[in-house]
Amino acid sequence: MCVTSHQIIKVFTRFITTFFLLSALTVSAFAATVRGKLQDSQQQPKGYVAVTLYSSRTGRSAAVYTGADGMYYLHDVPAGEYFLEVWLYANQPPLTYKVTITDPGTDIPPIQLP
């Protein structure tokens, strides 16, 4: 049985194509759950506050609200650099904090609000 260069190229091309497709699916499948806690100046939980993530690449996420315990959870967040936006007051700009999402379960250190 004789293998031609055309057959070798065909097999190699299929291998490379499959490799890159699987790599792309793996990268795009990464989505983190981000969690954190908001506290007031006495380190008491700050409940029922809207929180969003913003990046120029993905835009602004849907708002989530802290629970009575001050905890918030953002799901399906792609890895990257973001601004965590805390919306304390209506008709006011949010307080912003730069965060980096790198792990599937990213914990943001507690944020003490003014």
Image (cartoon, rainbow, N blue to C red):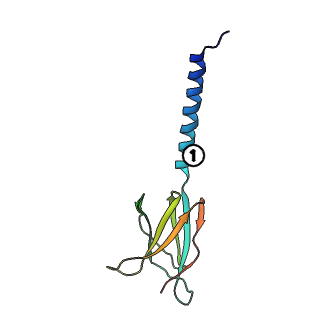
The residue wearing badge 1 is 26
Residue 5 at x, y percent in the picture: 59, 17
- Residue farthest to the left? 91
Judged left or right of residue 1, residue 100 is left
Residue 38 image position (x, y, % from top left): 52, 79
What element does badge 1 sit on?
helix
Residue at 55% across, 27% down: 13
**Above or below: residue 71 compared with residue 42:** above
- The residue that appears at 55% across and 38% down in the rendered structure is 20
Please count the marks in the image.
Answer: 1
Residue ID at (46%, 69%):
83
The one of 16 and 111 positioned closer to us in this rendering: 16
Image coordinates for residue 70, horizontal then vertical, percent: 53, 78
- Work out whether residue 37 or residue 84 is closer to the camera in this orientation and state it: 84
Q: Residues within 10 Å of mark 1 (few under 14, many from 20)?
A: few
Q: Is residue 84 above or below residue 111?
A: above
Q: In the rendered image, which quarter contains the N terminus?
A: top right
Q: Residue furthest bottom?
A: 42
List x then y, in percent, for residue 73: 52, 68
Find the residue positioned furthest to the right.
Answer: 1
Q: Is residue 102 above or below residue 99?
A: above
Residue type, mark 1 in image: Thr
At a point 50% along the width and 63% down the height, the residue shown is 81
Of residues 20 and 9, the one nearer the viewer is 9
Furthest toward the front, the residue is 5
